[in-house]
Amino acid sequence: SFRFFMTTKLPNPHYPPEVCVKVTLVNFAITPAGLEDQLLGVVVIEERPDMEEKKNQLVLGNARMAKELAAIEDKILFALSNSTGNILDDHELIEMLAVSKKKSEEIKAKVADAKVVEKEIDINREKYRPVAFRGTLLYFAVADLREIDPMYQYSLQWFISLFINSIRQADPNEDLEERLKILIDHFTYYIYVNCCRSLFEKDKLLLSFLISIRVLEGYNEIDSDEWTFLISGKTPRAMSQANPADEMEPGGWINGRMWTDVLSMSGLTKFEGFETDFCEVTTEWQAYFDSAEPHTHPLPGKWQYTLNSFQKLCVLRCLRPDRVPEAIMNFVVEKMGQRFVEPPPFHLPSCFEDATITTPLIFVLSKGSDPAKAFLEFAKEMRFDKKVKMLSLGQGQGTKATNMIQDATQKGLWAYLQNCHLFLSWLTTLERICDELSPDTVHKDFRLWLTSMPSPKFPVAILQNGVKMTNEPPKGL
């Protein structure tokens, strides 16, 4: 009866073929539909706890009644199979059948009534689905960030806690339609703010763009072929046309890469005939190409009016890819609002408020950054400057770091471990220590602070459960 189970926290684990053929792999990853139902339950519990409680009681009641019906059927079958002689002469059996029939009819009537009530509850629950749907879109937008940097890891548990906090912090409103709109807008910005503090400056606009695209995709406002072209330059089919102004010829300004992209883009449905029109008004397109701000320059001919803002991004990608970031910023402002391109300033106290004794605070470093000064100033503000233990990690410091954390958990100190990336082999021990932290055994004032440069070997579990922060050094004068 021996069984061997293994689990992994890697989002996309790769096992060699010789292992795959010997084991049964079970994909336990969250699906959009499953997450949406889970978030729907969360929002209904927060908004209408009475309705969710009634729904749960109905589910339990229906299960109990189904079990009773099955037991009655089993009892009847057992009695019939063990009956001797003429069944009509067995008064006890006939009486039991009559009682069972009456009980069965009562249960069926209760089940029918419960189904009516459950249907009414489900109709009311469905009214909150738009909030759960937006939450699902945002989760997968945030989950994609791990492809950009290995330190951008976020757990579902962290996401749901933000979801609950957002619901509680959003402005109340008696009108359901207005309340839903408030919840959706508040959580969308709330997740943006909480993710921004853990991203480097270069990636914050990308977060805004990802959120915008995910939301628009969810409402079928983005064509998948156009999105594929914008990020890869590939389309299902490309058109064929000679370059009208090859840069290799006198007066030419279109290089091979630009013209290849134009022909690829012309194969998209909304760009039908684009390459032909382009050849007819090449001088007007040259003015667009030479413009200091092509992302705000009107497109020649009908294309200014027939293309939407996202499709104009595709045109800009072909001719002036250097201006795509500015165009993306304008696109985000148009679709999501100005606040989504204005990242909030770094604020250590608000990060500290989100941390607990079991969630470490992690400074993700960049070249030239040192958060130690800001940390010590904050410790002084919190009157903890005398209760801070600091250690710079390196080879041979493992035992000292372990003892320091254990001492801090008992005395309610702040343990500050610097440069975790310099002692990656010890981080598995640190992951175990973090897993064992419990509110029942750890002093309520204890906090664990870590600093590390980005590293693909940094434990995912610590990153997902921790409060991540970036504080880059000032650039330029």
Image (spheres, rainbow, N blue to C red):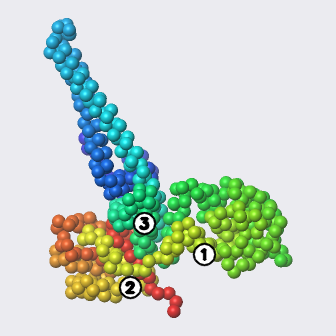
> What residue sits 28% from the left and 49% below the top?
53
Residues 208 and 446: in front is 208
**Circle 1: element type:** helix
Q: Residue furthest left?
A: 92
Residues 177 and 298: in front is 177
Mark 3 burial class by Cα count in 10 Å: few <14, some 14-19, many 20+: some
Spot occupied by residue 8 in the image (x, y as percentages of width and height): 36, 57
2 vs 1, front mark:
1
**Circle 2: element type:** loop
| Mark 3 vs mark 1, CA separation in Å | 26 Å
Q: What is the three-letter code of the residue carrying label 1? A: Glu
Mark 1 burial class by Cα count in 10 Å: few <14, some 14-19, many 20+: some
Q: Which residue is mark 2?
A: 370
Q: Which residue is mark 1?
A: 326
Q: Which residue is mark 3?
A: 186
> What residue sits 44% from the left and 82% below the top?
472
Residues 412 and 332: in front is 332
Q: What is the three-letter code of the residue carrying label 3? A: His
- Sooner in the amino-acid sequence: mark 3 or mark 1: 3
Spot occupied by residue 171 in the image (x, y as percentages of width and height): 38, 66
- Sooner in the amino-acid sequence: mark 3 or mark 2: 3
Q: Is residue 4 left or right of residue 122?
A: left
> What residue sits 17% from the left and 8% below the top?
89
> What residue sits 75% from the left and 64% below the top?
302
3 vs 1, front mark:
3
Question: Residue 271 appears in which quarter of the rendering?
Answer: bottom right
